[in-house]
Image (cartoon, rainbow, N blue to C red):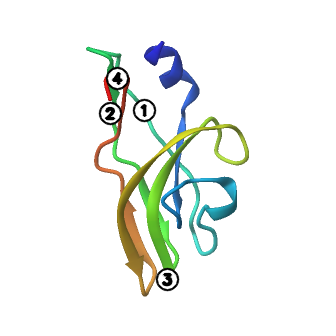
């Protein structure tokens, strides 16, 4: 089941609200969704195997990360809340680790 989900989720996004949706995804500047890869499922969990890095436009706040099927549009399969980070100027945001866990 998780391996199948990992095959569907190919991109991550940044959002200004703790509940990700297409209406609160960041935009502007050089921002775009980034590709994410997952390893094989183990003990009910899959973990990312890369560290997607985003260009964040100044004046933005990052509050959650979304998991999508495509680089634009597509299906939002879920999201994770993160500690809110506000960018006064353009900056970088890196997803250092991500996991999808059936045990929680």
Residue at figure coordinates x 69%, y 61% from the top left: 23
Cα–Cα gap, marks 2 and 1: 6 Å
Query: Residue 49 — which label?
Result: 2
Count of residue discs:
4
The quarter holding residue 8 reads top right
Q: Secondary structure at mark 2?
A: loop
User: Looking at this view, is 90 or 61 the one in front?
Assistant: 61
Q: CA distance from mark 1 to mark 4?
A: 7 Å
N-term-proximal mark, 4 vs 3: 4
Determine whether, in the image, residue 85 is placed left or right of residue 78: left
Find the distance from the CA under tag 3 to the CA under tag 2.
28 Å
Could you give the CA–CA distance between mark 4 and mark 3, rounded to whole angstroms?
A: 33 Å
Q: Horizontal and vertical percent for residue 67?
A: 53, 41
Checking the image for residue 37, the label placed there is 1
Write down the residue under mark 4. 39
Q: Earlier in the sequence, mark 3 or mark 2?
A: 2
Question: Could you classify mark 4 by the number of other residues whose Cα lies within 10 Å: few (under 14), some (14-19), or many (20 or more)?
Answer: some
């Amino acid at each position: 089941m998780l391996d199948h989900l990992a095959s569907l989720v190919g991109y991550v996004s940044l959002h200004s609200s703790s509940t990700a949706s297409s209406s609160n995804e960041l935009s502007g500047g050089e921002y775009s969704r980034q590709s994410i890869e997952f390893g094989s499922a183990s003990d009910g969990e899959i973990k990312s195997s890369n560290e997607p890095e985003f260009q964040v436009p100044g004046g933005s706040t990052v509050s959650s990360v979304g998991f999508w099927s495509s680089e634009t549009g597509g299906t939002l399969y879920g999201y994770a809340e993160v500690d809110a980070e506000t960018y006064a100027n353009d900056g970088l945001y890196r997803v250092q680790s991500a996991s999808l866990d059936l045990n929680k």
